[in-house]
Image (cartoon, rainbow, N blue to C red):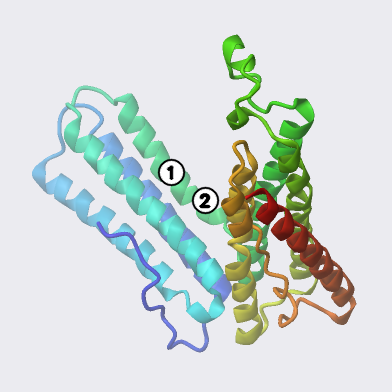
Amino acid sequence: MIPPTDGESNESHGDFNLPNFWETLAQAAKSTSQEATKLSLAFSKPPLPSEQDAEKMAESFQKSILALSTVYMWFPKSQGMTLRRIIRDATAQVLEGVVQLIDVILSTPLQSLSQEQLTSTGSVWSSCDQFAHLPKDNQAAVLSLLTSHIAVVKDAIEEMEQAQTEALDPFSDVLDDEDLDSRGNRDTYWSESDRQLMAPCRGLMKASAACLRKLTAAVKSNGNVNSSETIAQLDDLADITKDISPSVDDLALSLYPPMDYSGVQQNVSLERNVFKTSHVCLEADQSWVEFLSGAVDHNLQKVGALAQGCG
């Protein structure tokens, strides 16, 4: 069973009806969940279904799976690539769960309903149920991604600040006493020059968090899906910001001793013009865009000078 890809969506229908799509998708997911239940129960205890009954169940299950995949393919790319990917991933999760369930049924002796079969069946149920909770348009899809990015960046900042404030040695709680006595080992603590470099890096991390928060608020207040142009602009925002949280994560990792100065310099980039060409950025937003740009420039210069001196 091949998971769905971005593929070719059904772009020929100019009268695409989004509410009808979600209703049809929900029905297909419900049908797949019900077919999984039937199959699992039929093979939960002796006697085995007859060959004819098993064939009917297999055909019915296959129809429901194909229907789910087909409905996903109906979703036009013009309605938003961000949302389309979310739907694709949810559909793929169902298919993976179905494959796992069938593998368990085929490999488990037919005596009683095993825990593994229960778990696999429940996994299909859960993956089918998640369609009801997916974002329903591209604006909501982009907001869901931005929210997840904010959480990652927030965690990275908090971990770094906690490591700085708890002790001079960030590894003091995991080293043996004899290792702690070896204060000459720079692999386990920050030097004074390291700490000077951390200040502007922390400033960049906080600027990233502020960028994501401001963008989230702008998308929530000003974003719309009324035209293909605004939908595409939302996709652009999602594509640009997807690199912020992993960059912050990588930057935080490069700051732990022994500090990786080359890694610090590679991970201090931040897209500052992410808003300016988008409909979500109104004239009133220009002030904080410029403020963040200034903060980024200031910290980038400090990081560059300090990292070059330390390296």
Work out whether residue 26 or residue 182 is closer to the camera in this orientation and state it: 182
Q: Dot 2, crowdedness within 10 Å: few (<14), some or many (≥20)?
A: some
- Can I make out residue 26 in this image? yes
Relative image position of residue 41 (x, y in whole percent): 29, 35
What's the residue type where badge 1 is placed? Trp
Residue annotated with mark 1: 125
Q: As displayed, is residue 129 above or below residue 63?
A: above
Relative image position of residue 289 (x, y in whole percent): 82, 71
What's the residue type where badge 2 is placed? Gln
Relative image position of residue 257 (x, y in whole percent): 62, 36
- Can I make out residue 217 in this image? no
Residue 111 is labelled as none
Residue annotated with mark 2: 130
Label whose residue precedes the other's in the sequence (2 or 1): 1
- Residue at 40 percent across and 72 percent down: it is 73
Residue 75 in the figure: left or right of residue 210: left
The local secondary structure at tag 2 comes to: helix
Residue 27 in the figure: left or right of residue 3: right
The local secondary structure at tag 1 comes to: helix
Relative image position of residue 197 (x, y in whole percent): 74, 48
Q: State how many labels appear.
A: 2
Query: Extreme left residue here?
Result: 51
Query: Extreme top residue here?
Result: 177
Residue 45 in the figure: left or right of residue 289: left
Work out whether residue 205 or residue 79 is closer to the camera in this orientation and state it: 205
